[in-house]
Amino acid sequence: MKHYSAFAVAREALRYHTGWERAWRSPEPKKKYDVIIVGAGGHGLATAYYLGKNYGIQNVAVIEKGWLGGGNTGRNTTIIRSNYLQDPSAAIYEKARSLYEDLSQELNYNIMFSPRGVMMLAQTHHEIRGYQRTAHANALQGVQTEWITPERVKELVPIINIDGPRYPVLGALWQERGGTARHDAVAWGYARACSAMGMDIIQQCEVKGVRSENGRVVGVDTTKGSIDCDKLGMVVAGHSGQLAEMAGFRLPLEAIALQALVSEPIKPCMDVVVMANTVHGYMSQSDKGEMVIGGGTDAFNNYTQRGSFHHIEETVRALVETFPMISRLKMLRQWGGIVDMTGDRSPILSKTPLGGCFINCGWGTGGFKSIPGSGWGMAQLMATGHSPLTEAFTLDRFKEGRFIDESVAAGVAH
Amino acid sequence: MLILNCPYCGVDAEESELSAGGEAHLKRFGPGSSEDEFHDYLFMRENPKGVHFERWRHSNGCGKWFHAARCTQTLEVFGTYSAQTTEPPKELKDAITAKRPGWTWREYE
């Protein structure tokens, strides 16, 4: 792997950019790997990367039905924050946020992490109490957040209307070190680093079956033939249920569509991320100038990667009241992703009933921000059989009543 | 936009007139059931990529609950039927089989 640097850009400029090599190889699958990860999204690639980097397990294949980073990794609104109420959530999301801080340097790939600050507006009295409680919890967890007044909100976001009749801003939970990153670059950066370690990233290779012997996984059948493995990691978000069925167990998940949209690009007008959970809308401005808007989920099961238009209408209607200046913006694109929701709206990172098979799913509406932490914990779990980051997120917590209850009722942007 | 026919008032209701109520024909387990049964009842859903039976409420209309059969992969609606039943009517199951041979749903097929 050639090192990316300012010098490399200058060198290539002088020779008509003929010296760039492909960021990752596209090999044919080998007969056997130590570890197979199914799903080349952010979580899957991060898992492979930390398996190689932290545990020296480099005989790894990451197999992907479509193209790398083409699922929810390429469909989210790129927000990174860790202001969660429960200790296990705060630990894994804060680990992820802190890894994001120097991920560009570590991967030698610019993921454009922008710690611009994330603000969660309180627009009802319940939210004031909830967010103040979260701020206190975060202080104990070592996560830097603070409760701020409406005046401070207005100072940070001049385009906001803090005294609207329906959705007045009563304060906000402010995480100064949260922000955004370039979502595709996160997947690409991890893929490049994995490939450089000798791992095989095999795209357009769909898993058709999971083979096991004596209660232990021995390989997968794919559209590119049969591949053997010692350990299998399933990291496929929306389609986790289908994959688990092939492996002979069930998951407490339901797949639903979550939507987002972007406006035409405009001049810089908002340099923080604003989330308004009462109205299920959140907004930030991309480096290109587009307003990136996240909406709510549909209430019904859906695998189509497109959602209902009236949810977009509800989100935009509420955001227009909070940000009157966006009322004349044209929206350029709208899309949906399939999110896998668990009963307590927290993820599952766990061993499974099938030996040697591990699952990482259920991130629901909050997967992007957790990619490095999820990969770190999952790699530790797969390599050593135990990880302090993932120990609370087991598959059997539902049976045991150990829920990690992050605003179950919200169902979005918890 | 999803359009479902309410079997009670006969209205072709748009999605914004309805509330989704999740998976249909759940068998309820309560006191006296085993841990596994209670766990599955609370958390384990069929979540199929394909034929799905679900509950809807005509909340901004007649207010009644009813059932619908829908494909989660294409959003095609196969039909709606009364809530006063523990399994889909035979005609509907036959109609689904004609369109999606080999579908399964718990004990029905």
Image (tube, rainbow, N blue to C red):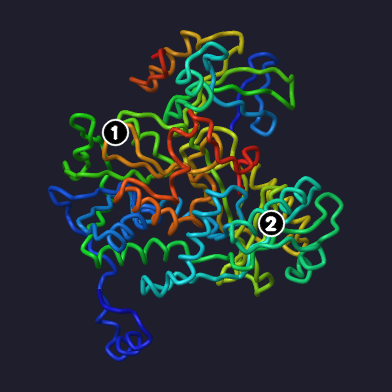
Eyeballing the image, is B39 above or below A31?
A: above
- Chain letter belonging to callout 1: A
Depth order, front residue of B69/A159: A159
Which quarter of the figure is the N terminus of chain A placed in?
Answer: bottom left
Q: Which residue is mark 1?
A: A354
Residue A157 percent location from the top left of the image = 73, 68
Nearer to us of marks 2 and 1 is 2
Residue B74 percent location from the top left of the image = 46, 34
Please tell me how crowded label 1 is: few (under 14), some (14-19), or many (20+) other residues with Cα within 10 Å: some
Depth order, front residue of A276/A265: A276
Q: Earlier in the sequence, mark 2 or mark 1?
A: 2
Depth order, front residue of A350/A108: A350
Q: Which residue is mark 2?
A: A135
Residue lying at the far front of the rendered structure: A140
- Chain letter belonging to callout 2: A
Eyeballing the image, is A214 above or below A334?
A: above
The amino acid sitting under disc 2 is: Ala
Secondary element type, mark 2: helix
Q: Who's the residue at 22% across and 57% down the image?
A: A200
Q: Would residue A58 be found to the left or right of residue A191 on screen? A: left
Secondary element type, mark 1: loop
